[in-house]
Image (tube, helix red, strand yellow):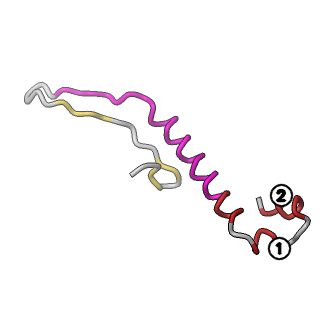
């Protein structure tokens, strides 16, 4: 992103002098992570029933990215 802005704006310090490019890049990254989480979370949960107590237990696969949870 920094290199692209430097070329487009013809200014080597544009990325360092302005705050919006960093904010924009962080928003794009957050959106991509949200979409990835939605893709992995769309599978239905598995519902198991304990034979002895009749209690329902919901099992859902958890996903992480470099040991960081997508959602908390």
The stretch in magenta equals 25-49
Query: Taking 48 as reference, is 63 left or right?
Result: right
Query: Taking 6 as reference, is 57 left or right?
Result: left
Foreground residue, 50 or 24? 24
* Residue 39 x, y percent position in the rendering: 52, 35
Residue that sits furthest to the right in the current view: 10
- Report the residue at 89% width, 61% height from top: 7
The answer to which quarter of the image holds residue 5 is bottom right
Foreground residue, 66 or 41? 41
- Report the residue at 15% width, 28% height from top: 50
> Considering only vertical position in the picture, is 52 above or below 72?
above
**Mark 1 sits on what residue?**
13
Specify the quadrant that holds the N terminus: bottom right
- Report the residue at 61% width, 54% height from top: 27
Residue that sits furthest to the left in the current view: 53
The numbered mark at residue 56 is none
Of helix, strand and loop, which mostly describes the magenta segment? helix
**Mark 2 sits on what residue?**
4
């Amino acid at each position: 992103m920094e290199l692209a802005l430097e070329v487009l704006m013809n200014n080597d310090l544009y990325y360092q002098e302005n705050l919006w490019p960093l904010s924009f890049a962080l928003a794009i990254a957050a959106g991509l992570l949200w979409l990835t989480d939605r893709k992995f979370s769309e599978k239905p949960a598995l519902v198991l029933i304990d034979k002895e107590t009749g209690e329902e237990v919901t099992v859902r696969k958890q996903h992480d990215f470099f040991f960081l949870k997508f959602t908390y």
